[in-house]
């Protein structure tokens, strides 16, 4: 396969199998991008430039202070504090190019907070209020002016070399959105092809001119490679598995996925989430795993390692006693091993204390509830009721197979079954599975609604934060003794 791009004729519709053809954007040199998930150089450069601007603003602001009060350590702490605050507020998010006035309140507010903290904790509090106010004003003016220059430079670059994009969705809607974007070259995005998710209606529009239409994940990925596609715009409703496969393939290549609201009413799409905004008048937001989760994945893993390690040590004597009692009462084989599906659909072996003995491996893999549960011993009922049988999963957490908090893992048979019946179920595997989760603390354990579980699990992933994990763990600890296991 060649990486050269071929310009499509106006009437071309379907790309032939084996050689994807898309429209090459004006002034854009094609070629393969970097590894999957790696951002293009202009975005990295813009992020560094914004950091330098914020640091320069600190230096200009401190020039207002008397020479005797220009403490290097205080200046360094102020610069670090402002940069950290700006980063947490996604002010270094280079997926969008805001206007100078759009981020002015956020930038100035965080500068004021940084100065207030430094003044309260340093000798600067002895300065006159007028001097401090002037320093803050100079800092704000310098930072906002520098940021406006960086954003303006990038905006001009996008006008000269618009970012190539694929539009995914129903053909009619995708064509309408693409036409609107092409009429607005200043938006910085130029559609180069459509990816249809309504194949049954494709034949009705074959005679219409416009961008070429791709129909498979392979064609879409090939088009992305040939044309250096960086962004994918998802329009229209739909939960077809073909559409999900296409998006997974493009996300694996490193494309940024956006959801565009192609309808006049756009309730809840804009908001204040990182990357949210508008594109040529269409409300848009980032699609896929939350960026906040990726930024905090290290913190989540550290929390898992520390707590699971400590709990394994503390629960060791309890596990030993339970294992000895099970060995005496039910014979050998006190550890139950079962294949479960984890993050990104990867299987792993989950550990539990054995509280029942399935008739066969097939029954263990395909039977939803425990067979002959009434024949379980009183001690096994106690283990399941108190969830002590699940303590061995702390070892899965320590190894990295699972997390303390996340969607509960399920067996492959039921993952396939539930994925067909509930469109949102496969999306639960965007994150490591967990011992407890948002669904569990809301009573969704055992024989409860799979649809409700999926909704809670996906809501947890979409709004993930380290503090939310702590809250779920505390609520789980408060509900440690409960009537059923999971």
Image (spheres, grey):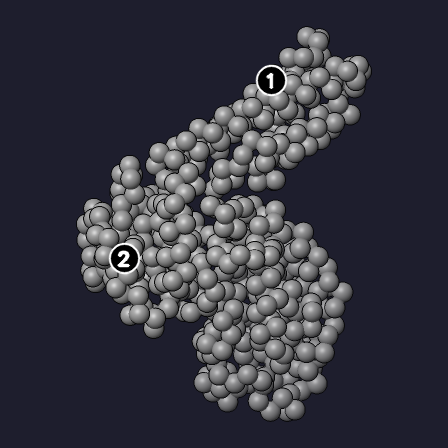
- Characterize the local packing of mark 2: few (<14), some (14-19) or many (20 or more) Cα atoms within 10 angstroms: few
Q: How many marks?
A: 2
**Residue in front for this viewpoint, 14 or 337:** 14
Residue plotted at (60% across, 35% down) = 103
Q: CA distance from mark 2 to mark 1?
A: 56 Å
The one nearer the camera, 163 or 129, is 163
How many residues crowd mark 1 within 10 Å: few (<14), some (14–19), many (20+)? many
Numbered circle sitting on residue 285: none
- Give residue 149's position: percent from left, percent from top: 50, 25
- Residue 392 visible here: no
Instruction: Residue 63 in the image: state x and y as whole percent.
Output: 64, 12
Task: Determine whether 282 is above or below 80 in the image.
Answer: below
* Looking at the image, residue 137 lies above or below residue 167: above
Quick check: 242 left or right of 92? left
| 30 relative to 269, above or below | above
SS for callout 2: loop
Tell which of 234 and 385 is nearer to you.
234
Task: Give the percent coordinates (x, y) of residue 159.
Answer: 38, 35
- Where residue 115 sits, quadrant-wise, is top right
The extreme top residue here reads 67
Mark linked to residue 59: 1
Query: In the rendered view, does 170 fall on the left or right side of 107?
Result: left
Relative side of 458 to 318, left or right: left
- Tell us which disc is closer to us: 2 or 1: 2
Disc 1 is placed on an element classified as helix
Q: Is residue 233 above or below residue 69?
A: below
Indicate the quadrant containing the C terminus: top left, top right, bottom left or bottom right.
Answer: bottom right
Give the residue pinned by disc 2. 209
Which residue is rendered at x = 55% and y = 83% of the image? 368
- Residue located 53% across and 28% down the image: 148
Q: Are discs 2 and 1 less than 8 Å apart at CB?
A: no
């Amino acid at each position: 396969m060649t990486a050269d791009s071929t310009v499509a004729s106006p009437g071309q519709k379907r790309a032939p199998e084996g050689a994807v053809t898309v429209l090459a954007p004006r002034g854009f040199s094609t070629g393969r991008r970097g590894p999957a998930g790696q951002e293009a150089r202009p975005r990295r450069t813009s992020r560094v430039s914004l950091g330098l601007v914020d640091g320069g603003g600190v230096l200009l602001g401190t020039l207002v202070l008397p020479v005797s009060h220009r403490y290097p350590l205080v200046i360094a702490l102020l610069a670090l504090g402002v940069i950290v605050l700006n980063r947490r507020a996604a002010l270094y998010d280079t997926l969008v190019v805001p206007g100078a006035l759009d981020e002015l309140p956020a930038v100035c507010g965080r500068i004021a907070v940084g100065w207030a903290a430094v003044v309260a904790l340093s000798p600067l509090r002895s300065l006159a209020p007028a001097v401090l106010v002037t320093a803050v004003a100079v800092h704000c003016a310098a930072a906002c002016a520098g940021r406006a220059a960086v954003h303006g430079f990038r905006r001009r670059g996008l006008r000269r070399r618009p970012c190539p994009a694929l539009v995914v969705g129903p053909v009619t809607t995708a064509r309408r959105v693409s036409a609107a974007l092409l009429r607005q070259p200043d938006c910085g995005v130029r559609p180069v092809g459509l990816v249809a998710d309504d194949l049954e209606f494709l034949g009705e529009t074959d005679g219409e001119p416009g961008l070429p239409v791709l129909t498979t994940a392979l064609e879409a990925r090939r088009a992305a490679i040939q044309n250096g596609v960086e962004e994918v715009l998802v329009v229209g409703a739909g939960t077809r598995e073909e559409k999900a496969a296409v998006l997974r393939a493009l996300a694996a290549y490193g494309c940024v996925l956006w959801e565009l609201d192609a309808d006049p009413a756009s309730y809840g799409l804009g908001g204040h989430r990182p990357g949210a905004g508008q594109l040529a008048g269409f409300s848009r937001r980032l699609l896929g795993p939350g960026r906040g989760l990726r930024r905090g994945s290290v913190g989540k893993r550290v929390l898992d390692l520390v707590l699971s390690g400590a709990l394994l040590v503390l629960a060791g004597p309890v596990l030993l006693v339970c294992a000895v009692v099970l060995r005496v009462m039910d014979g050998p084989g006190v550890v139950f091993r079962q294949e479960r599906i984890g993050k990104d659909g990867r299987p792993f072996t989950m550990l539990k204390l054995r509280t029942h003995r399935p008739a066969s491996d097939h029954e263990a893999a395909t039977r939803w509830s425990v067979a002959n549960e009434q024949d379980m011993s009183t001690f096994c009922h106690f283990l399941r009721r108190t969830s002590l049988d699940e303590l061995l999963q702390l070892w899965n957490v320590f190894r990295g197979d699972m997390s303390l908090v996340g969607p509960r893992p399920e067996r492959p048979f039921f993952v396939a079954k539930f994925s067909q019946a509930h469109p949102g179920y496969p999306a639960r595997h965007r994150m490591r599975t967990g011992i407890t989760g948002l669904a569990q603390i809301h009573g969704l354990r055992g024989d409860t609604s799979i649809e409700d579980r999926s909704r809670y699990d996906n809501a947890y992933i979409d709004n993930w934060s380290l503090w939310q994990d702590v809250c779920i763990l505390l609520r789980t600890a408060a509900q440690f003794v409960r009537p059923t296991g999971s």
